[in-house]
Image (spheres, helix red, strand yellow):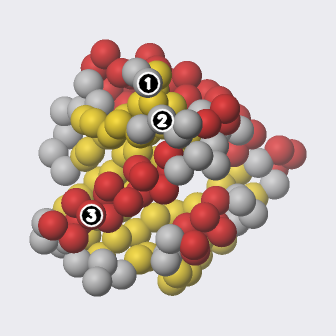
């Protein structure tokens, strides 16, 4: 039996659960994870939206976006390793895109580290590569990876 995915606005009370997911999902070698203070601050900033996904009351994923005028950017997406490949990431991105379509957003963006397996996930959702920033992400032993910029149509 598949359990329902519930998605709601994150509150200050969700930050500890979000940080557990963040620590589980992001490899510290790449420096992509945010701190709890950074996540708390987004709850107060205009244009930022932090969503948390839960299954049976257990936080299993989160999504952070920033919308300014007619553009929205995905800042962070993470799903707990125990809950991957169960539709949670797809549900979070789908909620964002639906809300963008319902609002005045004309373009969406995201950046992902070159070599990250999530690139295929985003392509499956209709995102296409539109640019790259060479040597943007750091890695082990001074290794650098490009940031791939992707966009998705909202029609």
Residue 43 picture location, percent across and down: 24, 32
User: For the point 30% across and 78% down, which residue is it?
Assistant: 154
At mark 2, the secondary structure is loop
Question: Nearer the N terminus, badge 2 or badge 3?
Answer: 2
How far is disc 2 from disc 3 in space, using C-alphas? 22 Å
Q: To which quarter of the image does residue 73 belong?
A: bottom left
Labels 3 and 1 touching (C-beta < 8 A): no
Residue 1 visible to the viewer: yes
Which residue is denoted by mark 3 in the rendering?
Answer: 98
Q: CA distance from mark 1 to mark 2?
A: 7 Å
Q: Residues within 10 Å of mark 1 (few under 14, many from 20)?
A: few
Tell which circle, 1 or 2, labels the residue nearer the N-terminal end: 2
**Mark number displayed over residue 56:** 1
Whether label 2 touches label 3, CB < 8 Å: no
The answer to whether mark 1 and mark 2 are in CB contact below 8 A is: yes
- Asked if residue 135 shows in the view, the reply is no
- Gap in Å between the C-alphas at discs 3 and 1? 23 Å
Residue 126 in picture, x, y percent from top left: 49, 77
Callout 3: SS: helix
Q: Residue at x 15, y 67 (%)?
A: 102
Please name the residue shown 42% across and 38% down the image: 4
Could you say which disc has been placed on residue 108 in the image?
A: none
Q: Position of residue 87 (x, y in %)?
A: 53, 50
Outermost residue to the right: 141
Q: Residues within 10 Å of mark 3 (few under 14, many from 20)?
A: few
State which quarter of the image contains the N terminus: top right
Residue drawn at (41%, 45%), measured in percent from left and top? Answer: 63
| Pointer 2 residue | 3
Q: Is residue 61 above or below residue 59?
A: below
Of the pair 111 and 62, the residue shown nearer to us: 62
């Amino acid at each position: 039996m598949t359990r329902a995915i519930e998605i709601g606005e994150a509150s200050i009370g969700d930050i500890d659960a979000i940080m557990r997911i963040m620590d589980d999902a992001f490899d510290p070698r790449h420096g992509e994870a945010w701190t709890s203070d950074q996540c708390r601050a987004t709850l107060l900033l205009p244009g930022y939206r932090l969503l948390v996904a839960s299954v049976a009351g257990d936080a299993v994923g989160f999504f952070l976006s920033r919308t300014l005028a007619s553009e929205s950017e995905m800042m962070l997406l993470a799903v707990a390793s125990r809950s991957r490949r169960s539709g949670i990431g797809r549900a979070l991105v789908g909620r964002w895109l639906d809300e963008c379509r319902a609002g005045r957003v004309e373009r969406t963006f995201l950046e992902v580290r070159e070599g990250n397996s999530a690139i295929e996930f985003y392509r499956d959702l209709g995102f296409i590569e539109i640019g790259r920033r060479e040597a943007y992400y750091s890695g082990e032993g001074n290794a650098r990876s490009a940031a791939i910029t992707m966009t998705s149509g909202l029609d």
